[in-house]
Image (tube, rainbow, N blue to C red):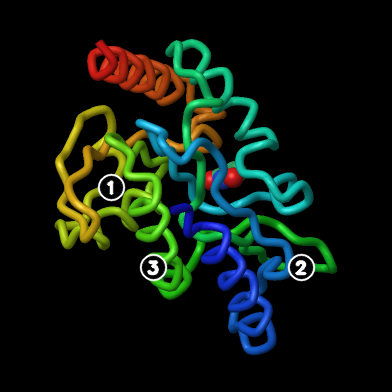
Amino acid sequence: MDRLPELYRQERERLLSYAESAPRAGEYASPVFGEGPMESVLMLIGEAPGAEESKSGHPFVGKAGKQLDALLAAADINREAVFVTNTIKYRPVNIKHGRSSNRTPSPEELRAGLPLLAAEIAAVRPCIIATLGNTPLKAMLLLSGNALLTVGEAHGSRMTLSLAAGQVQLFPLYHPASVIYNRSLAQTLEEDMKRLGQILKQQEG
Ligand code: URA
């Protein structure tokens, strides 16, 4: 049974009441939830929605999303077959002179996002979870009780994690937005994504 719509409804309510006392600014009234087929073999987890995602209500539709689409296409991975979500479901922001800019979720915000992330994994039961950047990698290592690693240490290789929902393969990747101005990291991300594509093909065949 698909429990996610009800869990997303509850999270929407939690965020609306949290907004009144939240210590950090965020677009709590326009959360973005996971999207994709419930039987997805691959789950992609980003950090948090950005401005475009918050506006549209869909994950990875802005600049980072376009880059993600290109990386997936180059690795022959069909985005339509992937469940895409984020570690926290609202856009965390800094507000200065009336303008909002993205910020990294605080450790408390990351921890508050873990129960829903665990529920998404339990509902979709992917074989492989690819994390995009440090925030979702940290979330997965916290959920599994593993020692924390950075994406620089862990990218491009598989680890088996034991979660309450069972075992899952973790494949850490750099975040598409973090490599924009670094050509060698961008190449590393392309190569890692292609490796992920090959692993998925092996699993299918
Ligand atoms: N960056 C993310 O981590 N997630 C999104 O949904 C968009 C940009």
Q: Residue at x 72, y 62 (%)?
A: 30
Label 2 Cα crowd, 10 Å radius (few <14 / some 14-19 / many 20+): few
State which quadrant residue 11 falls in.
bottom right
**Residues at marks 3 and 1, CA–CA distance in whole angstroms:** 22 Å
Q: Which mark is residue 150?
A: 1
Please, which residue is most extreme toward the front here? Answer: 1
Query: In the image, what residue type sits under mark 2?
Result: Lys
**Residue that carries the numbered disc 2 in the rendered image:** 96
- Foreground of the two, 79 or 64: 79
Q: Earlier in the sequence, mark 3 or mark 1?
A: 3
Give the secondary structure at mark 1: loop
Position above or below: 47 against 204:
below
User: From the viewer's perspective, is the residue at label 2 or at label 3 nearer?
Assistant: 3
Position above or below: 66 against 99:
above
Left or right side of 183 for 173: left
Residue 40 in the image: state x and y as whole percent. 41, 34
Position above or below: 12 against 151:
below
Residue 42 in the image: state x and y as whole percent. 38, 32
Q: Which mark is residue 115?
A: 3
Label 3 Cα crowd, 10 Å radius (few <14 / some 14-19 / many 20+): few
Q: Residue at x 64, y 27 (%)?
A: 66
Residue 193 in the image: state x and y as whole percent. 38, 21
